[in-house]
Image (cartoon, helix red, strand yellow):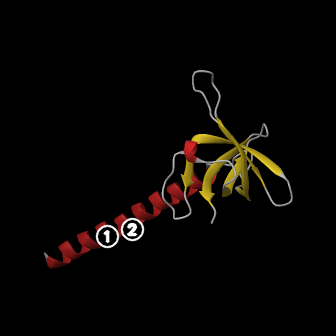
């Protein structure tokens, strides 16, 4: 009786190993046949520091967005759109409303450029 039970358990154990091997092989082949998602272009974050030259308030009724122009020490201007997802902070890291940005204030901006050339601010931090 013990020999029969031992033989039955051995067969079941060997069969479970075969099924486990088969299922892992099928999942490996499925993952190899599915191509990974590849974006059509890579979004690159850029940085720009300077003084706020102008701030123009957006109007949701007219479809305009809040815009800011920053000029660096060499005189290069950068115009940016500030979306609702942009993080605006003061020099201590406290959240600010984008409307609190004042002309002449020093800022550091992290932004991306869309395919159409629009610069969108991801974050704006007041500089010291």
Front-most of 88 and 120?
88
Label at residue 123: none
Quarter where residue 20 is shown: bottom left
Label at residue 17: 2
Which quarter of the rendered picture does the N terminus lie within?
bottom left
Q: Residues within 10 Å of mark 2 (few under 14, many from 20)?
A: few
- Say which residue label 1 marks: 13
Front-most of 68 and 25?
68
Inter-mark Cα distance, 2 to 1:
6 Å
Which quarter of the rendered picture does the C terminus lie within?
bottom right
Instruction: Kindly identify the residue that appears in the image at 56 percent across and 63 percent down.
Output: 91
* Residue 86 seen by the camera: yes
- Asked if 17 appears above or below 53 in the picture, the reply is below
Q: Position of residue 34 (x, y in %)?
A: 61, 48
Q: Residues within 10 Å of mark 1 (few under 14, many from 20)?
A: few
Instruction: Kindly identify the residue that appears in the image at 51 percent across and 55 percent down.
Output: 26
Q: Position of residue 2 (x, y in %)?
A: 15, 78
Q: Are marks 2 and 1 in contact (CB under 8 Å)?
A: yes
Residue lying at the far bottom in this picture: please name it: 2
Quarter where residue 60 is shown: top right
């Amino acid at each position: 009786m013990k020999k029969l039970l031992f033989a039955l358990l051995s067969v079941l154990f060997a069969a479970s190993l075969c099924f486990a091997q088969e299922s892992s092989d099928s999942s490996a082949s499925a993952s190899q046949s599915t191509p990974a998602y590849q974006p059509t272009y890579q979004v690159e974050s850029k940085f720009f520091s300077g003084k706020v030259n102008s701030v123009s308030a957006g109007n949701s009724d007219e479809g305009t967005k809040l815009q800011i122009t920053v000029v660096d020490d060499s005189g290069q201007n950068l115009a940016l759109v500030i979306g609702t997802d942009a993080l605006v902070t003061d020099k201590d890291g406290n959240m600010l409303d984008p409307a609190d940005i004042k002309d002449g204030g020093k800022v550091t901006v992290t932004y991306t450029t869309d395919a159409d050339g629009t610069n969108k601010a991801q974050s704006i931090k007041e500089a010291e």
